[in-house]
Image (cartoon, coloured by chain):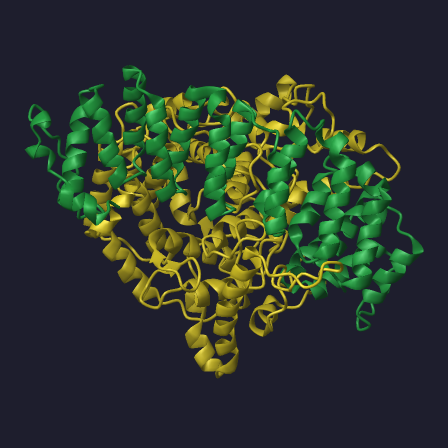
Chain colours: A yellow, B green
Amino acid sequence: MSEVAGGSLPRSDSSVAMESSPPSSSTSSSPPSPSDGPRRLTVTQLEQLKVEEEVFEIYRILRGIAPHTQSFMLELWRDAHIEFLTRGLGLLGPSYHVLDANRPWLCYWIIHSIALLGEPLDSELEDSVVEFLSRCEDKYGGYGGGPGQMPHLATTYAAVNTLVTLGSEMALSSINRASMLKFLLRMKDSSGAFRMHDGGEIDVRACYTAISVASILNVLDVELVKDLGNYILRLPTNDKNLKPPRNQICQTYEGGIAGEPGSEAHGGYTFCGLAAMILINEADRLDLPSLVDWVASRQGVECGFQGRVNKLVDGCYSFWQGGALVLAQRLSPILHKQLESFFIGGVQASVACNKSCNITTGETDLDGNLCGAGTSHAKIEGLSDFGFSFIEKQTECGPLFQSIALQQYILLCSQVLEGGFKDKPGKQRDFYHSCYCLSGLSVSQHSCSKDPSVPPPTRAVLGPYANLLEPVHPLYNVVLNKYYKSHEFFSRL
Amino acid sequence: MPSSVDEVDRIPLSARPEWSDVRPVPQDDGPNPVAPIAYRDDFRETMDYFRAVYLADERSRRAVDLTTEAIGMNPGNYTVWHFRRVVLESLNADLHEERDFLDRMTMRNAKNYQIWHHRRWLAEKLGPEVANKELEFTKSILDLDAKNYHAWSHRQWVLQSLGGWENELDYCCMLLEDDIFNNSAWNQRYFVITRSPLLGGLQAMRDSEVGYTTEAILANPPNESPWRYLRGLYKGNASQLISDNRVSELCLKVLKTSNSCRFALGLLLDLLCYGFQPSEELRAVVEALRNSEQDTVSSNLAATVCLILEITDPMRSNYWAWRRNNLPSQVR
């Protein structure tokens, strides 16, 4: 990746992935105990060792075989995946009743996966999907988990992303945007966050899904955005006079973002929180250097990502963590500014920090709210446009993770030869992991492209170049050309 | 999934006299449903009756019983849970009974959003008198999986809303004693020292916590959790971080004994970026870690640290190179 700023070429990441003779991972080496003699391994260490063993066995096989066989092992089994996915849209077995309140999710996981593979959907099937999702739409706005169920933000996100992915006039015009906005406003909590459904739980997932839907449908407004940033952000200051109180925000001391204030930093919530903050143009209020440091540290010796510190690798975090780093790549000017402001020398820390924050965020008043009519007005004008301009700008920053290594984990450890993807060796495939492993593979393959609509160079794709997937819009996780089509459609309305 | 015993004993709703007045409402899947599920008969029937009482907004005891059956078959159906709460509130039902039901459900489905949300609703209704019971209950879940995200969130909510902080720091110590790599327990520890009304907050706790954390790091330098925790102790207070000798001495100690520990080097890098002035000894230890092949002679210690990390931490070589190219101008 010669694009890495500064021109100095770090060793190509393929050498990391292919040659990695399993170094001792963070948790596998037996803890040296200076005083109390040898200690037993903890649960965390034992589980980690077991997974490392299985993963390294697979990589050992790869290293031991002839190059052309290697390429065969690294192939993406397109036909098998398409068959597995397409079958999922047909009749599902009785054991799927546990997903009976997630049927728009099934549609999204499957249809988005098929779109990533660049496979067209039968037009009759497309119409059935539109018709079915309309039955999940509530008369007062939003989509439920199945016909007749209450509207729910997560299934609303899944339904809208599915319809955007289908992309037909019929699909896009089937969404009632006016009632959608009413539904989203009804889910808005006084804290600035969102709740999942009437009387439902409040968390960062709800914030992201609400904002993503509003943004993609071009209905994002000031009411929806109000105080949301205060819920997610962590002020990079120690000033006690600043609100919100440090203990009621979701970015944690670790750097990642938690589901709700106080909880542990987590990959899924970190993606959701970061994407939501970008969509409302307030990403500069996050402590981005510590966020990036935390996410980059989640890629482990297995080559895939874990969701939390000292937890096991899982293929689905290829998207949640890998995607968060791809988002961060496009924030490099803000990151650069925040890193620059690290230096405090002899100056008192919080003062120096406050100053630099104001440069990047505009003036903040004592409540930590943005003030000054000019600033807030500019922010309000094109609220729904931040998702569009974000992807339009070229990025000068190369990938912040080892993209080839990640692709290796996805292809060798998550891919199921009979079709579909799984969490890790020893687990079963499912549609959720298929969707997020493929999404992660796509963001990984395209991570070194300055412009996402330009195909990446051969060296950016592990295995045959035919493995290349469609690029996604990383803020919404829909295939990029589908996003453009819907953007054109909804900006006319 | 219902156990086979339930299925065998189950009398269809259509055969129960108390339901004879209700006309079941089938699901409106349309002529060409997508991803239709081949429901078992008992599931389909239960949901058809549920739709009937839900649409009729029937707030009765039998409606509660019906939601019990529906939840047993699919605890992920938030509409059923929501309606159950609506009915229980209308009936002024005995919520202690509800707690027993919920305990059983949670034990079987410990990672389900709806169950934990219902639990929070319930505990809020029952108030501070159940604080200890709720803490005990989350403990029993954490005994099975010490990193269950929902259980930790609920526990934090209980502490903040209902109280029961007295033994929480001890509980964290116990879990960390058991598994020092348990990052959820470290997170809980941070939660306690920053928010417990009994401890005086971060400022008051910092000193002793730095001691505890340093010990944990020295016992296991490759354990990321205490390294993150240590930085957390100085969050938003970089000047204190760089002026506290214990932090730089810890880096020095670890780098002397365990070569190129990425957490020690990463922390040192941040210290340098904040403007920390390293001692000659620390400088020498870092220089010694530098690969002799690297001919880039740099008087800049921060850049040197990055270069070392680019080689010794290959999974993050892109990240460290990026850090090297984005050093604050004052330390470049």
Q: Quadrant of the C terminus of chain A?
A: top left
Q: Residue at x 72, y 32 (%)?
A: B202
Percent x, y of residue A428 = 35, 59
Residue that sits furthest to the right in the current view: B280
Residue that sits furthest to the front in the current view: A36
Viewed as shown, does residue B94 lie left or right of B304? left
Percent x, y of residue A182 = 37, 21
Q: Is residue A223 above or below residue B214?
A: above
Q: Residue at x 19, y 30 (%)?
A: B50
B246 or A256: nearer the viewer: B246
Percent x, y of residue A80 = 30, 65
B210 or A332: nearer the viewer: B210
Residue A239 visible from this viewpoint: yes
Q: Quadrant of the N terminus of chain A?
A: bottom right
Q: Is residue A244 above or below residue A174?
A: above
Viewed as shown, does residue B302 lie left or right of B160? right
The quadrant in which residue A177 appears is: top left
Percent x, y of residue A478 = 41, 46
Viewed as shown, does residue B6 lie left or right of A294? left
